[in-house]
Amino acid sequence: MTSTAQKPAVQTLTHWLSGKPAEGTSRRTAPVYNPATGQVQALVPLASRAEVDQAVGIATAAAKIWRAAPLGKRAEVLFRFRELLDRRREELARILTREHGKVHADALGEIARGIENVEYACGVPNLLKGGYSEQASTGVDVYSIQQPLGVVAGITPFNFPAMVPLWMMANALACGNAFILKPSEKDPSASLFLAELLKEAGLPDGVFNVVHGDKEAVDALLEHPGIAAVSFVGSTPIARSIYQKGTAHGKRVQALGGAKNHMLVLPDADVGMAADAAVSAAYGSAGERCMAISVLVAVGGVGDALISAIQERLPALKVGPGDQPGNEMGPLITREHRDRVAGYIERARGQGATVVVDGREQQFDGDGFFLGVSLLDHVTPEMDAYQDEIFGPVLCVVRANSYDEGLKLINENEYGNGTAIFTRDGGAARRFQFEVEVGMVGINVPIPVPVAYYSFGGWKASLFGDSHMYGPEGIKFYTRSKVVTSRWPDPASSRVDLGFPQNR
């Protein structure tokens, strides 16, 4: 007799509508993999236009109720939501590791940065204060108020399935909007977990909804007349398309695109510190970060020492399943993406780069989507590895003869998301922050993600729209200003006057 071990049943996920799970009706689904094993662990429903329309209808009704909620009530819900996130962050981190693949410590870091945005939004009574001018004209007062847009949507990427939704929804909800989240279909379960916490925190049903889907759902959100604004984070080609289609349909759109973040290392920099920073920023989360350092610009004679220092550190990196203690880097999100990233290594060699460390040579057990770390030297701007956003554990080193040459390289790149300079020279650092054409700058800080009370966003092809994300600009994005000019009746001064009003 023989026995065959049965595979565990594959779970089918749900949407989240009206404060509870909602089965998909379109019958289309997509697989959700465990990147560490290569196995399908769930199926996610892909919404039809009709399902998106249903979600918008639910959110529209709920928005009227939520908009009328006092600011203190909104803050109270967000405070409770923040406490639930903090209490259950380990559980959420395990979800991130299971579906995205990032190691547990990295997942906890993502959650911590997301919680910061919720904490900022908890201050909504202060953040929504307007202005008031008494006696702007005789007996006339003028004041401004900030009001919610109504129903807004967020379309979020696979690489931060908890943090990026929190970037958007915390401020959107605080400002009195209803929110529809369309998460990445590659790792959607974190969004459902957040929905459950919001329900437990006391958010009224229908104010926060999750609709899974692909291009059909995205197009439906962008075209639906009931949605006032759309926030997006993803690649530059898609961000450009999102911005064009959303604005063409009369929506306010913020669309954050791709990146090619450069780290400029001057000859006076501490080589060990710079090498530690480069390794951490290039290979953390398998390089699947829009703020990862993907190009290191070595100025003058520092290149050889820096390459040597980085190469010494790479054998100690532990790559493996994110749920196993001690591992520092997990798999990539899909097999197709892993193979795409690996292809840049061979093309770089063929185009003249030196492959100092080849991540394809590292062997892994099982069918997970793993790729070792790679280090490419003597990369030039004409090479594919330099021009494209690889979004994987590949660090390119470009040699520059001077600060000016390195700065020119950064400023001529089509992306302008993040950058960093490593130096002991305060004057050079200040000059760099003044001259570099990039939205987020680190000085001896390799991943300069702003704290929650500033705003996140790049320049050039890294951002479409005029609003950065979260922080003060996030509050502005999710509200619109209204100015009221007020006079209370005084029959004695009332008369007909066809002239243009004068403030006197």
Image (spheres, rainbow, N blue to C red):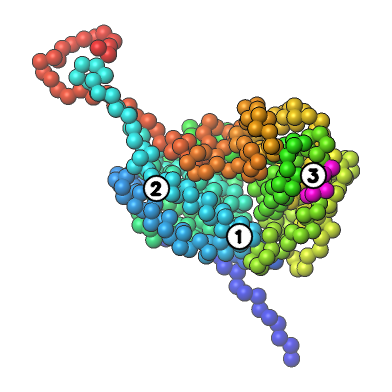
Which one is closest to the eye, mark 3 or mark 1? Answer: 3
2 versus 412 height, above or below: below
Structural crowding at the residue carrying mark 1, measured as other residues with C-alpha within 10 Å and reported as few (<14), some (14–19) or many (≥20)? some
Residue reaching furthest to the top: 499
In the image, 117: left or right of 65? right
Residue nearer the viewer, 325 or 473: 325
In the image, the segment drawn in magenta is: 304-310
What's the amino acid at mark 1? Ala
* Distance CA(mark 2)–CA(mark 3): 44 Å
| Labels 1 and 2 touching (C-beta < 8 A) | no
Q: Is residue 235 above or below residue 161?
A: above
Residue 60 can be seen, yes or no: no
Q: Which mark is residue 306?
A: 3
* Few, some or many residues within 10 Å of mark 2 (<14, 14–19, 20+): many
| Prevailing secondary structure class for the magenta stretch in the rendered image | helix
Give residue 141's position: percent from left, percent from top. 24, 23
Q: Could you tell me which residue is drawn at 32 percent across and 29 percent down?
A: 131
- Residue 105's label in the rendered image is 1
Residue at which label 2 appears: 122
Q: Nearer the viewer, residue 489 or 221?
A: 489
The three-letter code of the residue at mark 2 reads: Cys
Of tags 2 and 3, the one toward the viewer is 3
Q: CA distance from mark 3 to mark 1?
A: 27 Å
Mark 3: few, some, or many residues within 10 Å (few <14, many ≥20)?
many
The picture places residue 367, in percent across and down from the top left corner, at 75, 66
